[in-house]
Amino acid sequence: MNGQTSEASSPFSIASIVISMTTAAIGSGVMFAYVPFMLTHSVAPWAAGAAVTAVAFGGLVGCMVGGPLIKRVGHARLFACSMAMVIIAAVLIAADLPPAYWILARGLYGAAANVNFIIAQSWLNHAASNEWRGRAMSFFYMAYVLGLGCGAWIFGQIPTDGNLAPLAVVFFTALSILPIGLTRLPNPPPPASVSVNIAMAWRISPVGLVGVLASGGLSMVVQGFTPIYAATNQVSQKDVAFLMFIMQTGLLFIQYPLGALSDRIDRRAVLVVTCGLIVAAGIAALFVSFSTIVLLMIVFLIFGGAIETVYSVANAHANDRADPGDFVPLSSTLLVAWSTAATIVPLGVTLLTPIFGQHTFVYAIILVAVSYAAYVIWRLKERQPVPADERENIGIRSAQVPNASVLTDPETGKP
């Protein structure tokens, strides 16, 4: 028993979880670039947008069923099962079936991916000690997002006239099962049920709740529709892949400094500045052409990084104002809110794109950012900021990885 406790308290003990999820992220990055690129050039280009919505809707289902399934079979078994679902989704795409099956496959992936996030973050939260839990979670987020970027880059090196891309996804996903399967970490207690209490979340932090809603829509739109936008403009496969890779680096160049700033000043002021960056990047995206691809990549780096910042700062702002007893239901509510917005906003963009054209997703991003900034400015006049010494350290968080890190059994006392 003492050996288990010692192992669980070592930073090296989480290596298997981080390696597994980062390896899976490489496969996900390949598919996030491959599916929109192929569907945009297919006989049914409408399916590319529908696939984005399917991923988000699957994620919403996954965050609702993840907790009960973990209670039923345990973390390790469900991790293997959910990775098997990712493999099945990749095989459906490799089979060259009609677009409807691709959409179904992306829905399966979305559900499996959210279950994996809940498992991994719950396990990390249990294994890490209080002294370095924040750093462990930040490292996990950074490794996962950079894994997505590496997967996008790998897509640029793979020919698209065969099934090598989905086979690469199968390879990386199968490989990701091994570190978790061989880990000596004890299974953590089952996570708490995902409970939704919108009234409580609104009472604690309207800015946090609305911010997580905004970031869910913003993240899924910019990550899902950017490769569609590029492919529609006949951008080469390698340039699409590199564009997706560059967007992920916004986590380091945009989110980290703005997040650190929000630890020192009113987080709401940082949110307003961040929304300003998103609007500026959106306006630039409307006028910068693909003939200046390097400049466009910088624009989308700002896009991706600023949207990551909205998520992390809004989430931290909500946690700053929450009592310990409200922490788990607040996190559950924010998780469902993120997934719901990530489903609805891309669906709206998909339906409106035939009317407003290929820039519809940019218009939607600008509209959401302006609306949220206006709301935050109004709230600045209504409520005083939380004192700096009472705030949590924001660390690094990703809008692409739902915050399931605190969905653990409340009886364990782990935050």
Image (cartoon, rainbow, N blue to C red):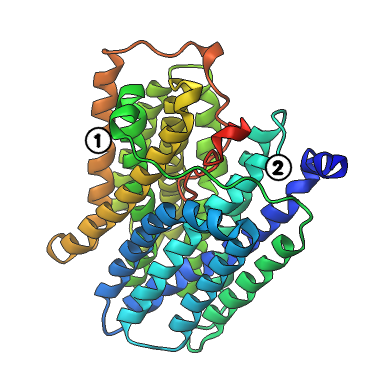
27 is higher (above) or lower (below) than 158? above
Where residue 13 sits: x, y (%)?
78, 47
Q: Residue at x 48, y 85 (%)?
A: 94
Q: Is mark 2 on a helix, strand or loop?
A: helix
- Mark 2 — residue? 127
Is label 1 in contact with label 2 (beta carbons under 8 Å)? no
Q: Which label was assigned to residue 223?
A: none
- Quarter of the image that includes the N terminus: top right
Residue 106 drawn at (x, y percent): 40, 70
Seen at 54% across and 79% down, the residue is 165
Q: Tag 1's secondary structure?
A: helix
| Quadrant containing the C terminus in the rendered view | top right
The crowd level at tag 2 (other Cα within 10 Å; few <14, some 14-19, many 20+) is many
Distance of label 1 from label 2 (alpha carbons)? 40 Å
Q: Which of 268/117 is in front?
A: 117
Measuring from the top left, give residue 199's x and y in whole percent. Answer: 28, 29
* Amino acid residing under circle 1: Val
For mark 1, what is the residue? 370
Asked if residue 214 is positioned above or below residue 339 in the image, the reply reads above
Amino acid at circle 2: Ala
The location of residue 183, given as percent across then percent down, is: 76, 58
Residue 309 appears in the picture as rendered:
yes
Classify 56 as above or below 123: below
Of labels 1 and 2, earlier in sequence is 2
From what the image shows, is residue 129 above or below residue 92?
above
Q: Which of 240 and 326 is in front in this view?
A: 326
Measuring 30% from the left and 16% from the top, which residue is drawn there? 380
